[in-house]
């Protein structure tokens, strides 16, 4: 395996190496978890189809009676598998957002432990933790945020999906649908008079992880740049 040495960056702030490693390990773990979950779901669906195909009673019935038999014997299991799929995909999305916010807090805490700013992280009032961490980086640490915002915005736009899953069990209201930034893997399906977020296989989780990975790479570079500016200024 060949490594592109031009992409290796040497941090001025040594602590950022550990932060970078922890970020990468967390993202890699989620990718592995997602793969394992989807493989398990696929196997479950395949086993279910095989069970139906091999059911002797079902195969012996006349076509007009097969539907009734299926609904009595297999329909509950079919619904259970669909619910398992929904819950697993919802759960990993919630976990990814929790991880992202946790790493953002870690980064802010690291900065706060190194520099004595008048404004502390706890002084910033915001209903959303994610925006509190962003405001700390932007307004307190004074990070260069013009380029970073393009990495942050796609993640922030998906926070509504996280909130609907966490607080409304995936049932989305009409006014919320208008706020959703549709990306690969997000579908809205009708259930009676309600609408529910339906996450497609792999696509949405991969989208989130790729955006988070890109953000962390950029934010650590900019944090290190600001660190170098501040430490040089303190020496003069």
Image (tube, grey):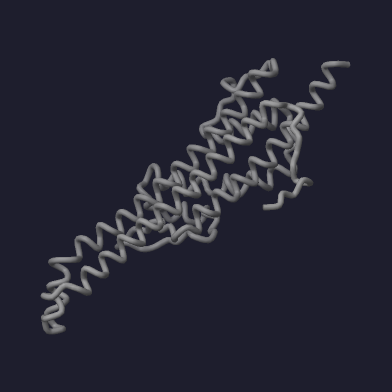
Q: Position of residue 139 (x, y in %)?
A: 70, 29
Residue situated furthest right in the rendering: 236
Relative to residue 60, is residue 205 depicted above or below?
Answer: above
Q: Position of residue 33 (x, y in %)?
A: 44, 48
Residue situated furthest front in the rendering: 1
Q: Residue at x 46, y 45 (%)?
A: 162
Is 145 situated left or right of 154 in this image? right
Q: Position of residue 156 (x, y in %)?
A: 57, 44
Residue situated in front as seen by the camera: 181 or 63 = 63
Relative to residue 225, is residue 161 depicted above or below?
Answer: below
The image quarter in which residue 219 lies: top right
Relative to residue 202, is residue 55 depicted above or below?
Answer: below
Q: Residue at x 48, y 49 (%)?
A: 32
Q: Residue at x 25, y 57 (%)?
A: 80
Is 172 situated left or right of 56 in this image? right
Residue situated in front as seen by the camera: 90 or 59 = 59
The image quarter in which residue 148 lies: top right
């Amino acid at each position: 395996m060949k490594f592109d040495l031009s992409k290796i960056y040497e941090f001025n702030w040594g602590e950022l190496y550990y932060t970078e490693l922890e970020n990468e390990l967390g993202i890699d773990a989620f990718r592995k978890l997602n793969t394992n979950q989807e493989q398990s779901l696929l196997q479950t669906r395949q086993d279910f189809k095989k069970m139906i195909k091999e059911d002797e009673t079902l195969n012996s019935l006349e076509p007009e009676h097969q539907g009734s038999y299926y609904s009595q014997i297999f329909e509950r299991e079919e619904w259970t598998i669909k619910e398992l799929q929904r819950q697993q995909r919802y759960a990993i999305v919630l976990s990814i957002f929790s991880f992202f916010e946790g790493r953002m807090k870690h980064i802010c805490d690291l900065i706060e432990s190194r520099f004595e700013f008048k404004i502390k992280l706890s002084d910033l009032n915001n209903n959303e933790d994610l925006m509190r961490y962003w405001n700390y980086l932007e307004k307190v640490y004074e990070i260069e945020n013009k380029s970073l915002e393009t990495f942050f915005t796609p993640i922030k736009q998906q926070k509504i999906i996280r909130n609907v899953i966490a607080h409304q069990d995936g049932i989305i209201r009409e006014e919320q649908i208008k706020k959703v930034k549709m990306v690969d893997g997000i579908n809205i399906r009708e259930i009676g008079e309600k609408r529910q977020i339906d996450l497609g296989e792999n696509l949405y989780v991969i989208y989130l992880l790729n955006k988070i990975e890109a953000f962390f790479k950029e934010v650590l570079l900019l944090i290190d740049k600001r660190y170098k500016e501040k430490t040089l200024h303190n020496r003069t």
